[in-house]
Amino acid sequence: QKHERRLLEARLEARVSETSGVLQEVLRMDQNALRVAESAQQDVRQLRQEKGSDEDRVALAVNTVERNTRERLDALECKMETAHLDHFRTLSTTPSKINFLQGLHAMQTGRRFGGGSNGAALKDFAEADTHQGSGGAARPLLRCVP
């Protein structure tokens, strides 16, 4: 009976020792997982801050470009002939205003901006505008001020 008891105690100790080892390993894995999760959480916070500052920089750059473009268009508008000015003011978007001015430039100088694939479209625009103008005669984009 003592012998059986010792055998049972030894088996029980072996099981407890094995279970304790497994539990310690699980605890180490949980601690590692917690460290990884905390690190990932901190990385996410940092990325959110960087994203916010990147978005702010892009928004500022876009606003600056838009403001400069509007100022340049306003300056050109002041220099335009009144015949072209009426048509220019009916255009609602900045890209359409730029296209109109490029067409007038092409019509006035015979040269296209950039000379790329867009050039043919600008030439067509200038020709169409010339035919719709007064007697087909091209008028200069800018007024001559003595």
Image (spheres, rainbow, N blue to C red):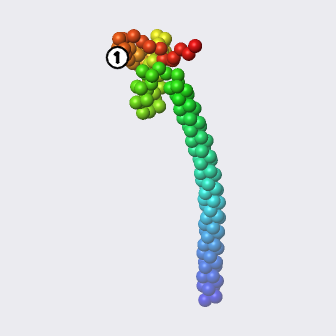
Residues packed near mark 1 inside 10 Å, few (<14), some (14 to 19) or many (20 plus): few
In this rendering, does residue 22 appear at all? yes
Left or right: 11, with 122 as reference point: right
Residue at 52 percent of width and 28 percent of height:
73
Q: Between residue 142 and residue 93, name the one nearer to us.
A: 142
Q: Quadrant of the N terminus?
A: bottom right
Left or right: 142, with 30 as reference point: left
Q: Quadrant of the C terminus?
A: top right
Label 1 sits on a secondary structure element that is helix
Q: Residue furthest bottom?
A: 1
- The part of the image, by quadrant, that contains residue 120 is top left
Residue at 60 percent of width and 72 percent of height:
19
Residue 22 vertical placement versus 52 (above, below): below
Q: Return the residue at label 1.
A: 132
Left or right: 13, with 134 as reference point: right
Q: Between residue 88 and residue 128, name the one nearer to us.
A: 88
Residue at 62 percent of width and 51 percent of height:
49
Q: Residue furthest front?
A: 146
- The part of the image, by quadrant, that contains residue 60 is top right
Residue 46 vertical placement versus 18 (above, below): above
Q: Between residue 16 and residue 85, name the one nearer to us.
A: 85
In the rendering, at what x and y percent does residue 47 appear? 61, 49
In this rendering, does residue 116 appear at all? no
Residue 100 vertical placement versus 2 (above, below): above
In the rendering, at what x and y percent does residue 75 appear? 55, 26
The three-letter amino acid code for the residue at tag 1 is Gln
Residue at 56 percent of width and 38 percent of height:
63
In the rendering, at what x and y percent does residue 138 appear? 42, 12
